[in-house]
Amino acid sequence: MFQGKALKVSLLPDGIAELTFDLQGESVNKFSLLVVSELQQVLDLLEKANDIRGLLIKSAKDVFIVGADIMEFGAVFASGPEQITGHLATNNRNFCRLEDLPFPTVVAINGFALGGGLEFCLACDYRIASTAAKVGLPETKLGIIPGWGGTVRLPRVAGLDTAVEWIAAGKENDAEAALTARVVDAVVEPAKLHDAALNCLQQCISGKFDYQARRAQKKSPLKLNFIESMMAFETSKAFVGGQSGRNYPAPVSAIKAMQKAADKGRDEAMQAEAENFAKMAQTPVAQSLVGIFINEQILGKKAKGWEKKADKKIARAAVLGAGIMGGGIAYQSALKGVPIKMKDIAQQGIDLGLAEANKLLSKRVERKKLTATEMGNVLNRIEPALTYDGFEHVDIVVEAVVENPKVKKAVLAEVETKVSSDTVLASNTSTISITYLAEGLARPENFCGMHFFNPVHMMPLVEVIRGEKTSDNAVARTVAYANAMGKKPIVVKDCPGFLVNRVLFPYLAGFAMLLRDGVDFQRIDKLMETWGWPMGPAYLLDVVGIDTAVHAEKVMANGFPDRMQRDFTSCTDALFAAGRLGQKNEKGFYNYELDKKGKPAKVAAAEVADILKPTIQGAIEISDEDIIARMMIPMATELTRCLDEGIVETAAEADMALVYGTGFPPFRGGVFRWIDFIGAQTFCDMAAKFTALGALYQAPDSLKAKAASNQKFYG
C-alpha cells in the first residue's frame, strides 16, 4: 500500500494492514519531520481504504521509536510559541487520526519506546510489549514536557498517580513495570511478539476486546471529582517541586498541564498540553538541557570516530597500583567485560583494591542490578598480581600509582620493558605533564594520559591526554578502552592540569580570594549550591582533599604564574598546616560524621574560624551577585583560553567536560552556553569590574571580539 523512506504499509490476510517503522540510514527510529510527513500520507491511505479491518504496527529495527528527533529542536524552540505549537499540532493530528481510525490498532513494542515513541503507542488501542522493551516519557530531563499527548493519554490509560510518577521522573521502565502500571496490556518473549500482537488485533476485530470503550476513556475527562482532583494535583505539585527544585521547572509544569486538562475532553486537553510545552521550550533550562543532549551526541560520534582508528580492540588491560583508584578502574573494566590485571608491589595494596571492587559489586547485588553469580564472574575478570607475569599479552596498561613524578617515571619505564612493543601505556595522573612523563620512555608514541575522576564508578568523564609524541593510535586505543568501560572520553592536549583541573583551580582561586577578603565560606557554599553546583567550593575541597588541592595549586602556579601564582597565604594552606585534610581524616572546612547510611555528613566546625583568621586581610561588603561573579569569571576566562589554545577542540567538548568532570549545573548547559545566555558583552563588562583582582579576571581577546561582533559560542 505504501513504501517510503521510513514507513511501509503491507496487507496481511483477513483484511489486516501492517505498518512498519524503518527509518533508512539510521540505527533507530525517531519522529523526524520526514517520519511525521510520511505518517500523514499513510493515514490518508488508511482512512480512505474500504477493505481494512485492523492495523498492526511494528518496527523493523531493534528498537520501536526512541522519540522525536532532538536535533531538530533548536530551530523550532527559537521560532516562538506559535511556531512551537504549530510544530506539535501536525503530529498531534496524526496521533488523533490514528486513534480515530474506523478499525482497531495494536502496536508491538519490541525495544525502546520513549517520548514521542510511547506517545504514539498510547494513541493505539492495545500495546503488546516484548520482555526486552523499555518505555517512558523522558521529556522533563530535557526541560520540556510531553507534547504529543503524553500528559493527556497516560493519566487516562494508567491513572493519575502513574502518570505523575512516570512523567515527573522521566525514567525508562522495563516491560514488567509497564504491565504492572497498566501502560502496556501484555508482555511476551521477543519471538512471540508479532503473533501475540496479531492475536490481540484479531480479538478486537471479532468483538471479544472492546477497543471502542478504550478510545472513549482516552477522549473523556479524568474520572475525578473536584475535591479528589484538587487534592491529587496540589499534593503532587508540592512533592515533585520539592524533589526537582526551582532550577528544573518542567516536572511541575507537566503536572499543571494534566491539572488544566483533567476536566476536558481529548482535543481541549491537547491544547492545554501544547501551551505548557511551548512555555517550557522557550526557557533557558530547556535550551541548555537540549544543548547538553546534542553535545552528548557530538561527543559520542567523536569517540566512535577515534575508536574506528584503533589498530585493535582492547581485549585485555592492566592497572598498576591497586589502591582505591586502581581498584575502581579494575572494577569498572571488569564490570564492562574487559579482563584486567591489577598489579601492586605489596599484598596490602592488592587486598585494598579487591576490597574496593568487592564493595562496589556487593552494592550492585543489594540493589538487584547484579546476581551473585554475575558478581562472581566480574571478580573473576580481575586478576591480582604482584609481578609482571603475563603483561606481554595486555593491550593497554593504566598506571595509577602515587601522584609523584619520579615514582611515575620509574614505574612507567619499568613496565615498558615488560609489555609488547605495541602495548599502549596510559597514566592516570591528574596534574603531571604527559610530555614530561614520556621523557624516559623508549616508545613515547605509545604513551598518553588517561585521567579518571574519583570515584571512578560514578564519574563519567575520562580525559585522554595527548603528549607531544603521542601517536594517533595510542589516543585511539585509549578512547576505545574508555568507551568499552562505559565512560565519556574527551581528547585534550597536554598542559598543566590538562582541561578540567586547569579550569577548576581558577574557580577555587576565586574562592580563596573571597575568603582572603573576609567573606564567610559557608555563605559562599550556600550561594554556589543555590546557583546550581552540587556542592559549594569549601565542601568540594574537603571531598577532593585539602592536601591534594594544595599540591595541585602548586602545579598550576608553576604552570601559569601570571594568573595562578598567589601573593598571600590561602585558606587551603592554613587548613593543611593545621592537619585538616578534608573528608579523608574527617576534618577540613567542615567536620565529618557518618550518617545512618554510613556516608560522611558535614557538620559545622567552630574551630575553623580561628585557623582561617590569620589569612583574612579585610572585611569587604559584597553582594550575592558579585560573589557569584568572582567565583565564575576565572573559570570562564580560563576555559576560553583552553579553547583558544586548542587544548580542547570544541565548545561542546569543553562544556561537557565540566558537566561530567566537575558537576557544573546541567540546567545552565555549560560555561560557554551560560556566556551565550547572558551575552559575551555582559560577561566582559562583569569581568572588567574585577580586573584589579588580577589576570584571571581579564577577559581574553577572543571573548572581547565575540562581544564586539555579538557572536556566540553556539550557533
Image: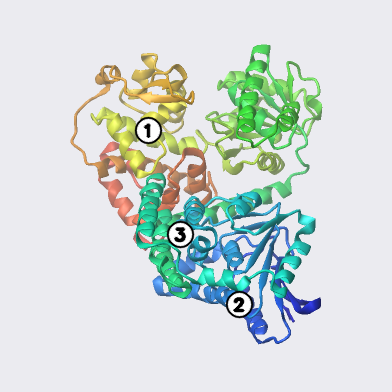
Residue 286, image x and y in percent?
A: 44, 58
Question: Do the CB atoms of the residues marked 2 and 3 lie less than 8 Å apart?
Answer: no
Give the quadrant of residue 391. top right
Name the residue rendered at 61%, 55% in the picture: 135
**Label 3: element kind:** loop
Task: Write down the residue under mark 1.
Answer: 537
Q: Is residue 424 visible?
A: no
Rendered image coloring scheme? rainbow
| Residue type at numbered disc 2 | Ser
Lower sequence index among marks 1 and 3: 3
Measured Cα–Cα span from mark 1 to mark 2: 50 Å
**Label 1: element kind:** helix
State whether residue 160 is above or below residue 309: below
Lower sequence index among marks 2 and 3: 2
Residue 485, image x and y in percent?
A: 66, 38
Q: Is residue 530 left or right of residue 118?
A: left
Disc 1 vs disc 3: which is toward the camera?
3
| Residue type at numbered disc 3 | Ile
In-front residue for pair 500/32: 32
Disc 1 vs disc 2: which is toward the camera?
2
Name the residue rendered at 34%, 18% in the picture: 574
Q: Is residue 483 left or right of residue 611?
A: right
Q: Is residue 44 visible?
A: yes
Task: Write down the residue under mark 3.
Answer: 144
| Residue type at numbered disc 1 | Pro
Task: Write down the residue under mark 2.
Answer: 37
Give the quadrant of residue 201. bottom right
Q: Is residue 612 left or right of residue 222?
A: left
Name the residue rendered at 36%, 14% in the picture: 578
